């Protein structure tokens, strides 16, 4: 452990594109203890979570490629997939890297 390192905002990697981002920039999908799969806008629902970039592209990729199912260690029924893809996305632009941060 590097002592004296500045504590930074925790980052998570998008399961689709593997880009590490601050948690606030990602959409958390959670598998609740009851087996429900749902988007977690608060980031506080109990259960196993997986993160995708906001904006929709990575979420649909993660669903179609099975990365989300793998990350959540479950299978995602078609109706849940469809429901996830209709989640309102907060980001207004899609994809594209915006310089360095
Ligand atoms: Zn992504």
Image (cartoon, rainbow, N blue to C red):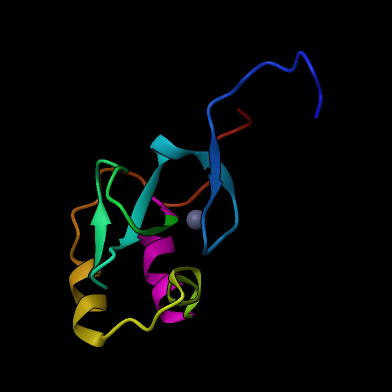
- Give the total of numbered labels: 0
Q: Residue 8 appears at what percent x and percent y?
A: 59, 23
Left or right: 52, with 6 as reference point: left
Tell me the residue at 42%/80% (across/down): 64
Q: Residue 39 appears at what percent x and percent y?
A: 26, 57
Left or right: 15, with 92 as reference point: right
Residue 72 magenta: no
Q: Nearer the viewer, residue 84 or 34?
A: 34
Whether residue 97 appears in this view of the structure is: no
Q: Nearer the viewer, residue 57 or 72?
A: 72
Quarter of the image with the C terminus in it: top right
Q: Residue 40 appears at what percent x and percent y?
A: 26, 51
Quadrant of the image occupied by residue 72: bottom left
Left or right: 65, with 92 as reference point: right
Q: Nearer the viewer, residue 91 or 80?
A: 80
Left or right: 49, with 39 as reference point: right
Quarter of the image with the N terminus in it: top right
Q: Which residues are magenta?
A: 52-65
Q: Residue furthest right?
A: 2
Tell me the residue at 50%/73% (across/down): 67
């Amino acid at each position: 452990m590097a002592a004296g390192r500045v504590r930074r905002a925790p980052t998570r990697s998008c399961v689709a594109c593997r880009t590490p981002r601050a948690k606030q920039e990602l959409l958390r999908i959670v598998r609740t203890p009851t087996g429900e799969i749902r988007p977690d806008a608060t980031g506080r629902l109990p259960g196993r979570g997986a993160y995708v970039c906001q904006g929709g592209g990575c979420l649909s990729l993660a669903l179609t490629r099975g990365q989300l199912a793998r990350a959540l260690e479950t299978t995602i029924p078609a109706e849940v997939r469809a429901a996830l893809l209709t989640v309102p996305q907060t980001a207004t632009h899609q994809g594209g890297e915006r310089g360095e941060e």
